Image (tube, rainbow, N blue to C red):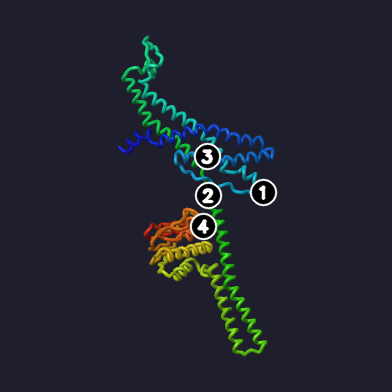
Amino acid sequence: MTYLAAALLSSFSARTWRSYGYLWVLLLVAPFALAYALLVPSLLAGLAITLVGLFVAGWLVLAARGWGAMYRALARGILHDDTPAPPPVRAHGGFWATMGGNLGDATGWRALLFMFVSFPVAILGFVLSTSLLAASFGAMTHWLWSWSLPAQRASDGTWHRGASLGPDWFVDTPVRHLLLALAGLLVFLFVWPWITRGFAGLVVLLTRGLLSPTAGSLRVAAAETARRATVEDAEARLSSIERNLHDGAQARLVSVAMKVGDARDMLLTGSSTEDVAEVLASAHSDAKGTITELRELTRGMRPPVLDSGLPTALETLASRSPLPVKLQTGGLEGVEVPTPVVTIVYFAVAELLTNAVKHAAATRIRIEADTRELDRRHRALTVDVFDDGVGGAALPTGARDRTHTGRAHTGTGLLGVADRLSGVEGTLTIDSPHGGPTHIRITVPMRA
């Protein structure tokens, strides 16, 4: 009964009438879009012999992105279909690179293809939908206005007023009026809404297929984002190293130099041996402290334990954690994990442990490392981190949204981990309902 009720009410639903309105708008726009889609290749063929013509054609290809944005906006505003926009135009340096980039803009050409292909679909959909709607209403109301039709003579010499649906078959009796009205009602209830929705949905499928980002463009955008994050991370690390050297090691070295200078002056002025020894002991202590600080600084840049393999590196992290950590790395036995993957996973797990300690209010943590097949030729390393904390961990929804209820300020650290992983086509999967527990999986292709 539910499906029958839905079918009976589909003709009166807002979705059906939005679809019909969408076909109306497409009818108004499609001819202009088709003209533009035919203009661009025509101009390109005719003006290809001149540089100015190539530039004009290139800008027209880029302008087709605007048509694509308009069609996406129509689908979103009328049918509530949110087709994502492709990445923006990439800047090209130089005269020839700019011209070639404009002419070869794949997004613009796909928009032109959409404008060409959607024209017959829009016209056919509108004509068929409108014809069915008009025919159904005409059939249901035929008994009201059939008297105004001109009289027609049958083969037996009789005259009739009404629609002629075959040789000598006229709708001019109560029974035939009723049958025609029922036929019109069935078309209105069961045929027209699905034809209308079907054509509107077909245009939406074309919109998603031709006006949305391609997998390649998404990979390029992700790579650019990862590269930008890597550059920013490297800049932040360099700034941190510079600050640590300036405020720590450099200040200690200056102190050592001053104390050694004082000891020299004391020797020249004939000071007692005890006083000189005291100054030199202080300088010696500062020098040892500087060595320790430099060693800690270089260890933070790239811990030597990474050269011992991932299981040992994870054991080191687990031993340093203030919370009890249960580590399972049996799945890595006999597996040679590339050094770049070890480095990426080490710092990612270190950040996750820090989050669990600082923000999760957890009492214990479990880490499981294993490998799995990506396809027949490639494998991926997976590291699962579990904690029994309060949950609520999530990636921020926007660049400025870096805090989350129940697990304060976890967004920034997790975003850094996700950016680090995205640079090598890795993924970060988070399952952290409010109240806990939390399960975070790191997946990194072994070919990274």
Residue 229 place in picture, x, y as percent: 55, 57
Label 3: element kind: helix
Residue where numbered disc 2 is placed: 218
Closer to the chain start, of discs 3 and 4, is 3
Q: Is residue 330 visible?
A: no
Disc 4 from disc 2: Cα separation = 15 Å
Q: Is residue 40 visible?
A: yes
State whether residue 78 is above or below residue 347.
above
Q: Are marks 3 and 4 in contact (CB under 8 Å)?
A: no
Disc 2 from disc 1: Cα separation = 25 Å
Label 2: element kind: helix
Residue 157 lies in quadrant:
top left
- Label 3 vs label 2, nearer the camera: 3
Residue where numbered disc 3 is placed: 70
Q: Hey, what amino acid is under mark 1?
A: Gly
Closer to the chain start, of discs 4 and 1, is 1
- Label 2 vs label 1, nearer the camera: 1
Residue 362 lies in quadrant:
bottom left
The mark found on residue 419 in the picture is: 4
Residue 62 place in picture, x, y as percent: 59, 42
The extreme top residue here reads: 157
Q: Hey, what amino acid is under mark 2?
A: Leu
Closer to the chain start, of discs 3 and 1, is 3
Residue where numbered disc 1 is placed: 94
Label 4: element kind: helix
